[in-house]
Image (cartoon, grey):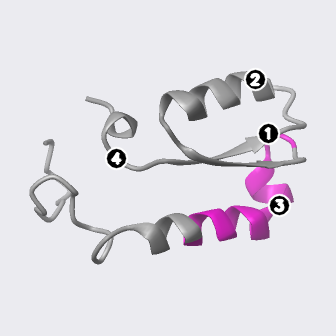
Amino acid sequence: MAAWKTAPSWYIVATADQLIPPEGQQFMARRASARTIEISASHAIAVTQPAAVARQIVAAASSQPGKGDERESGGQRATPDSHS
């Protein structure tokens, strides 16, 4: 099962993206029930807007229970070879 179906998700819609239309990005974000922000940026948002991307990453990491390495279901530590 895809992680976005069960794990909390975050998404940055790059509204000036000419590769993936913003409507497509919004659809993917809604499908994942992602916490979404919109930024006027191209597809290369991590390069052109690094501070905004970093803020979204920090927000996502800060909102996770525990140390961020435990799964919500069962509280088991995720390891590189875990495939639950």
> Which amino acid type corresponds to the residue marked 2 in the rendered image?
Glu
Alpha-carbon neighbours of circle 2 within 10 Å: few (<14), some, or many (≥20)?
few
Q: Mark 3 = which residue? A: 49
Q: CA distance from mark 2 to mark 1?
A: 13 Å
Residue 61, magenta (yes or no): no
Residue 46, magenta (yes or no): yes
- Between 74 and 80, the residue placed more toward the observer is 74
Task: Looking at the image, tell me whether mark 4 or mark 1 is earlier in sequence order.
Answer: 4
User: Disc 2 vs disc 1: which is toward the camera?
Assistant: 2
- Residue 26 image offset from top left, x and y in percent: 68, 30
CB-based contact (under 8 Å), mark 4 and mark 2: no
- Residue 17 image offset from top left, x and y in percent: 84, 34
Looking at the rendered image, the quarter that the C terminus falls into is top left
Q: Mark 2 = which residue? A: 23
Give the residues drawn in magenta, as a range: 42-58
- Residue 42 image offset from top left, x and y in percent: 86, 42
Q: Mark 1 = which residue? A: 43
Q: CA distance from mark 3 to mark 1?
A: 10 Å
Mark linked to residue 7: 4
Q: CA distance from mark 4 to mark 2?
A: 23 Å
Q: CA distance from mark 4 to mark 1?
A: 24 Å
Tell me the residue at 87%/27% (across/down).
Answer: 18
